[in-house]
Amino acid sequence: MYDSGNNTALLVSTPGIIQEATTAMLNSLSQITKVQLVSGALSAIEWLRNEDSCLLVVDANIPAEEAELLVRWTKHYHPDTRCIVLVRSMVELEWARAAGTDAAFLRSSSAKQLSEHLWPKEQRTRSQRAGDARS
């Protein structure tokens, strides 16, 4: 669930250049206060069982079946956790939407496109007003 002071993103991605780039992109977003890395669905489930994550980002560099099961498990057991999937193709985009993601993007999407969909619209508006009040 969105909390303007503590927004942890759990990134599920195999180690390598894609994980590093995605981590850097998430760290550049003002809505994210911390990025936690895990390399697979089982590690993500273990983490989600013990921690509250407001945002789950699944990179399609893990097997599609594993990513789909993770999204379905998360939406069942942690329905307030926002799930975003970064995919490589339109075919993966379709399974991601069918699995119940809150948003799915081609991996080539910009950080701006992603940041616009991190939180539901009503929460983005609230946080923007809170940010404006602090300015």
Image (cartoon, rainbow, N blue to C red):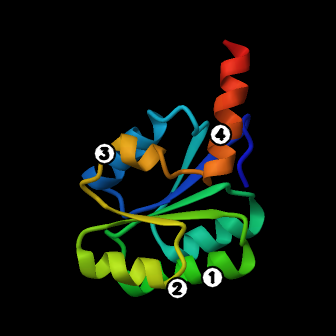
Say which residue appears at 61% left-offset and 36% top-offset: 33
Q: Is residue 22 left or right of residue 132?
A: left
On residue 48, the disc is: none
Percent across and percent down for residue 24 are 39, 39
Marks 2 and 1, Cα distance to the nearest angstrom? 6 Å
Q: Are marks 2 and 1 in contact (CB under 8 Å)?
A: yes
Q: Which residue is mark 1?
A: 73
- Relative to 103, say whether 98 is above or below: below
Q: Are marks 3 and 2 in contact (CB under 8 Å)?
A: no
Say which residue appears at 38% left-offset and 40% top-offset: 112
Q: Which residue is mark 3?
A: 110
Q: Which residue is mark 4?
A: 125
Q: Nearer the viewer, mark 3 or mark 1?
A: 3
Marks 4 and 3, Cα distance to the nearest angstrom? 21 Å
Find numbered disc 1 in the image and state the secondary structure of the residue it sits on. helix
Q: Could you tell me which quadrant the C terminus lies in?
A: top right
Say which residue appears at 67% left-offset and 24% top-offset: 131
Residue in front for this viewpoint, 34 or 133: 133
Say which residue appears at 74% left-offset and 43% top-offset: 3
- Relative to 123, say whether 84 is above or below: below
Res. 109 visible in picture: yes
Marks 3 and 2, Cα distance to the nearest angstrom? 26 Å
Q: Are marks 3 and 1 in contact (CB under 8 Å)?
A: no
Q: Name the residue type under label 2.
A: Leu
Find numbered disc 3 in the image and state the secondary structure of the residue it sits on. loop
Q: Which residue is mark 2?
A: 69
Q: Is residue 103 left or right of residue 112?
A: right
Percent across and percent down for residue 51 are 74, 59
Percent across and percent down for residue 101 are 52, 72
Marks 2 and 4, Cα distance to the nearest angstrom? 31 Å
